Image (spheres, grey):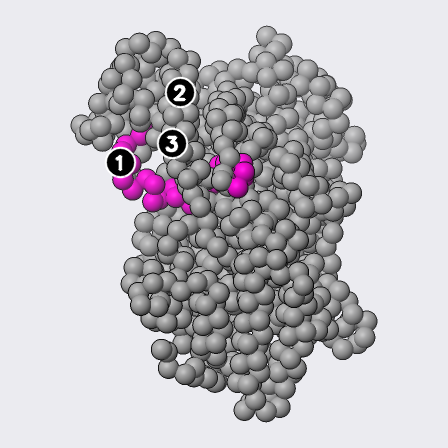
Amino acid sequence: MKNRIIITNIQRMCFHDGPGIRTTVFLKGCTLRCPWCSNPENLSPLPEDYEKDGIHGVYGREYTADELVKMVLKDRDFWGTEGGVTFSGGEALMQTEALEDVFRELKNRGVHLAVETALFVPEGLLEKAMSYIDDFIVDVKILESSLCREVLGGNLELYLRNVSRLYESGRLKLFRVPCCREYTFSERNRELLMSFFQKYTGIPVQIFAIHSLGEKKYQSLGRAMWKVEELGWEALETYCRELQQAGILAEVIRI
Amino acid sequence: MREPAAVQTGQPAGTITGIIPEGRMKMISKRIIPDDFKDNGIDKSYDEVFALICQNIRIQIPEGRFVYFVDAEYVMDTTKGYRYENLTPACDKILHRGLKGLKYPEAEVANDFCRSYNTVLDQLIVLADRIIEALEPCGSRMEQQKFWFERLKDRPAEGFAEAVQRMLFINQIFWQTDHRLTGLGAWDSYLLEYYQKEIERGSLDRKEALEILKDLYRTLHENYTYKSNVMLGDTGQIFVLGRSNEQGNYICSDLTYLFIEAMKEVQQSEPKCLLRVSRNTPGDLIETALESIATGLGAPLLANDDVILPELIRFGVDKRDACGYGTSACWEPLIIGKSTSLNNMTVLNYLKALDNLLKRERLEEIRTFEELVERYLVYLRRNLRAVKRVLSGYRFQYNPLLSVFTEDCYEKKMDVSQGGARYHHVGITSVAMGNLIDALWNIREFVFESHRGTLYDVKKILIENFAGREELREELKGRASRFGTDEEEVLNLVNRITACVSEEIEDFRSYLGGRMKIGLSGSAYMDAARNFGASFDGRRAGEPFTVHISNEDNDGFTEIVSFASQLEYGSNRFNGNVVDFMVSPDFIHHNWEKYVEFLKGCIRKGFFEMQMNVVGSRTLLEARENPDKFPNLIVRVWGFSAYFRDLPEEYKDVLIERALKNEGLA
C-alpha cells in the first residue's frame, strides 16, 4: 500500500495555497462529510467513474512517489524562493504514509512544502507529516462537539488536540473558515470561532462563503448537491470586522 | 508633371487627416503611381524617383513638437520585384554625423552604387531645405525645429529632442519610399548619451523627457491607416528596449523605463515596445513592463536574451552583433541596422503534409503510429523542398536608401540587393503545429489504439468535413489539447518534427548566400486556414488554426511556458517562437506580486518570447456588440497591438473563444 498515492488533480500556478507560486496536489479521500463540500470527487479514497457531457472518465489516478515527484517538479523554476508544493484534498494527511517518500524527496531538494488540511486525522499521521511539512493551512468548521460529529462525522476533541500540537510547533500558518449560514456561520458557532481564534493569537484567518461551483462534479457522479445558500459579501465583511476588532488578523477572500 | 508642392500647416499631432482617407488596404488594390515616376511609360531609375520624392512631397507642418509627415499620394512604387520590408534600418547613423557626413568623398565614388548612395543623401538635404523653408512662416514657434533641420545637414545632433527629430526624419523617408513594416530599433540606447548630457547640464528633466517621448509615440501613431499592412495596426513599428551585453550583463537605463511609461500613458495601439529580458533584468523593470501590459496594451512583448542570444551566436552571428538584435515587426529576431534578412518570406503549414499524406499515400501500408509519423516527415520534406525552390529564385530590388542606413554597405560599396549588408538570411514562419499534434494524437487513438476506424476512414471523414460525424468531431474537439502540455511524448514529437525541418532547410542558400530560418510563430493562422480542409483535431474546414504557442486547456500558464522552454530552437529554429496567452485583468491585479514572480519564473524557465492579451471575455463580448462604447479597447493580435473595433469579425471571434476557454467558461 505504501506507494499507492491517489490523486484527482495537480493544479499548477496556484496563488492562494501558501506562500509564493505553488503546485497544489489534490489527494483523494476525506475523513469528513461536510454537506457543503465543493470537491465531491475527493471524498471516497478510491477511484470513481463519472460521466460528464456524455464523456466517461475516472476521478482519481494512482501515482508512484517517483511519478508524483517528477510531475510536481515541472514547475520548480517558477517557485522562486517562496513557492513550492501544497498538498490538499480531500484530506491530504490521510495519505501521509504513502506520501512520505514524496515529502522526503522534495524536502531533500529544498522544496517548501505546505498542507491544507481539516486536521481530523490520527495524531500519528500528523506527527509524521510534521517532520517534513513547513506550513499548515488548517480549516476551521463546526466547533461544537456533538454537531461536529453529527454533521461532519468528525471527532472535535481529536481536531483540537491536533491544532494545539501544530500551534506549539510553530508550523500552523493560517486558518480558513468556509462560511455556511446553517452551520459554521451560525450565531453560536461564530461565538465559538471567536474564542477559538483568540486562543491562537497571531495566526491569520481567512473567511470565505461556500459556493455552488462543485455542482457539475456532483452531477457527473450522479449525486445531488446540498442546496447552497450563498452568504453575501456584506455579512462576511461585518463578521470579519468583528474578528479584527477582537485583535484577530482576519480577511475575507473569494474562492 | 506634378503641381508645385503645397505646404499644409496646422496639422495637429495625433490625427490622420491629410493621409489617404480610403486606407492602406484600398490603396494596395488601387495603387496610385504618380505619372512623374515614368518616362513615356517606362519606369525612371531609382535615383530619379528618389529625387522626385524629396523635391515634390507635400510638406506638412504640425502644431506639435516634431516635424513628421508622409505624403501617401506620392509614394515610391515597389510593386515590381521583391521588395525589402519588415526591416529595421540603422536610423541612429544620422545622430553622430549630418547627412553630408555620411556621403562618400568624391575621390571614393567608385561605382554606380556610390553615386546612388550620394544622390540619396543629396536629395535628403534638398528635402531638409524644403522643410526649413516651410518652417519659415511659422516664425518663432518653429525656430527650434528650423535649427534642428539646419544642423541635420552637416552637424552631429546635440540635444535629446533634436536626436529624436533626426531619427523621425529618417523613419518618415522610409515610409515615403514604401518600406512596409519599418521597425524603429533600440532608441533607449541610441538616445541615452543625449539624455544624460542634457540631464547633467540641467537643460532637461525626467518629466520633460517623458513628455517628449509621449509626443514621439503620438507622432508615430499618425498615419496609422497608411502604415498598416494587411490589417489595421500591423505597422511593424516597434521600439526594442533593454539588452544584454557581450559579458552577459543586463543593460537598461532610465530611458528604458521612460519608453515603457510613455507608451502606457499615451494608450494608443502603436507604436509598441519589445522588452528584451534576461535573468539579470531588474525586478522593477519587469514590474514597469507588467504595469503597461496589465492596462491591456499587450505590450511590451518579452524576448528572452538567455535563450535567443546563444541561438543567434550558434547560427553564426557575431556575438557583438547578436547583442544588438531586435525583431522583424513581430517576433523574428533580426540584427538591427546590419541585416537585410527577410524573415517572413513564406508560411509553412504543418497540416499540409498530413493532408498530402492522407490524399496520396497507400494508407493500408501504414500499420503503426510510428510509420505514420515517418511518412508524415517524408511529405513535410517534400513541401519544404518546394519552398526552397521558390525562395532561392527571389531577387531583391535595388535600394540605396536602405543601403545608406545599413552597416557595411558603405565599406563594401555595395547595395543591399547585391549583398552589401552583413547578414542577409531569409526566414519563414509556420502555422498549425498545434493542430497537427492534436490531429496526430487523435489519429493514434482512433486508428492504432482503439481501432475505431482506419486511416481511410479518417481521410473520408476529413474530406466530408465531418458530415454525419458531428458527434465524433465534438469528441475530438472536446479533448484537452496536447500541444502545449509539457509531457515528454508531446515534446519529443514536436522537437522531432522541427528537427526534420531544420535538417531539410539547412542546405538552402539565397542568391546572396543567406541561410534559412524557421519559427513556430506565424500570423497566417487565419488566412492559411480559410481555404484549408478539416483536420482530425476536430477543426472544421476553414476554421482558424491554433495561435502561435498557445493552449487554452492548460491548468495554469506555467505549463505552456514550461512546454515552450523545452522546445529546441537550435540550428535554424529561432525565427520567432512566441508563447501567447490570454489573461484577465482581474487575475493580474488581484495577484500582482505573485504575477511579477511568475514572470521572473518564466524567464528563468527559458521561454523564447512571450506576449499576453490582458482582457476579459465579458469586455470582448460587450465590445463586439457595442463597438462604439469601446473605441479604444486594444488587444494583441499576431505580434502587434490593435484596436479591437478595427479587427475583422473572425479575429474578434478567435479572441473571444480563447478568453472564454481561459476563464473556464467554454
Quadrant location of the C terminus of chain B in the rendered image: top left
Magenta stretch contains residue B529: yes
Q: Residue furthest left?
A: B468
Q: Is residue B204 visible?
A: yes
In the displayed structure, A181 sits above or below A56; it is: below
Q: Secondary structure at mark 1?
A: loop
- Find residue B367 and report its image quarter: top left
Density class for disc 3 (Cα within 10 Å; few <14, some 14-19, many ≥20) is few
- Callout 1: residue from which chain? B
Say whether disc 2 or disc 3 marks the residue closer to the N-terminus.
Answer: 2
Q: Do marks 1 and 3 share a subunit?
A: yes
| A53 lies above or below B325 | above
Indicate which disc, 1 or 3, sits on the residue closer to the N terminus.
3
Q: Is residue B397 magenta?
A: no
Residue displayed at 54% across by 76% down: B127
Label placed on residue B378: 2
Label 2 – label 3 distance at C-alpha? 13 Å
Along the viewing direction, whichever of B308 and B428 lies nearer the viewer = B428
Q: Which residue is mark 3?
A: B386
In the depicted view, which residue is nearer to us: A191 or B561? B561
Position of residue B179 measured from the top left corner of the image (x, y, whole percent): 47, 59
Looking at the rendering, the stretch of residues picked out in magenta corresponds to B512-538
- Crowding at mark 2 (Cα within 10 Å: few <14, some 14-19, many 20+): some
Q: Secondary structure at mark 2?
A: helix
Give the residue displayed 62% in from the left and 90% down from the top: B140
Disc 1 residue type (three-letter) = Ala
Instruction: Give the percent coordinates (x, y) of residue A191.
Output: 62, 45
* Dominant secondary structure of the residues highlighted in magenta in the image: loop
Q: Quadrant of the N terminus of chain B?
A: bottom left
Chain of the residue displaying label 3: B
Residue carrying label 1: B541
Between B1 and B622, which is closer to the camera in this rendering?
B1
